[in-house]
Amino acid sequence: MTKTLPACLLLLVLHQTVSADLLCQTHEKVSFSCPVGTKSLSVCSANDKTLIYRFGKPGNIELELESQVHFSRTAYSGGGEGNLTFSRGQYKYVVYSSISNGEWLEDGTRDKVERAGVYVVQNGWLLADVACTQLSGDHIIRYLPPYEEEPFQYYD
């Protein structure tokens, strides 16, 4: 019995660590999620019309924005980038996910470079590029309610 308790505690801690970056509620679909330092960034869908952007920690959401889907994408050599845009006043929060060709490898193939995170934009000017600190399957923009694609905008 004493061996069971530590094993259960370990599983509980591991479960909290693995799911700590998801800020979506249990009834929502995950469209995007990744850790950003000690905080997390998630885009969730609770219905067929809108997405919810959340930034912070579970139990302490610092920013939450709900919006219709504003999705754009572009193709790169060997990949592409998708963006989801959320607006609040003069600020835009542009969640991005991309993959492109990297350096040539000895076997003649190319390395793949993946990037994901959020651009913080004020009045059209890039204030910050907050990159995901760890990439997993959740960092790829996926499930989206129905939408009309918008023109892609580059930020650098």
Image (cartoon, rainbow, N blue to C red):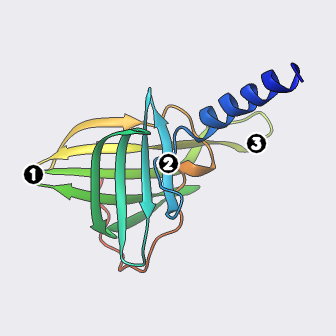
Q: Nearer the viewer, residue 112 or 27?
A: 27
Disc 2 to disc 3, C-alpha distance? 33 Å
* Place of residue 156 in the rendered image (x, y in percent of width and height, measured from the top left): 29, 42
Q: Residue at x 44, y 59 (%)?
A: 44
Contact between marks 1 and 3 (CB within 8 A): the answer is no
In the image: residue 143, left or right of residue 52: right
Q: Secondary structure at mark 3?
A: loop
Q: Secondary structure at mark 1?
A: loop
The answer to whether any part of residue 155 appears in the image is no
Q: Amino acid at mark 3?
A: Gly
Q: Secondary structure at mark 2?
A: strand
Which label is found at residue 90?
Answer: 1
Q: Residue at x 55, y 43 (%)?
A: 114
Q: Earlier in the sequence, mark 1 or mark 3?
A: 1
Screen quadrant of the N terminus: top right
Q: Nearer the viewer, residue 137 or 59?
A: 59
In the image: residue 36, left or right of residue 7: left
| Residue depth check, mark 1 versus mark 3: number of the one nearer the observer | 1
Q: Nearer the viewer, residue 154 or 9?
A: 9
Q: Earlier in the sequence, mark 2 or mark 3?
A: 2
* Place of residue 29 in the rendered image (x, y in percent of width and height, measured from the top left): 52, 64
- Which residue appears farthest toward the front when viewing the image? 1
Which label is found at residue 108?
Answer: 3
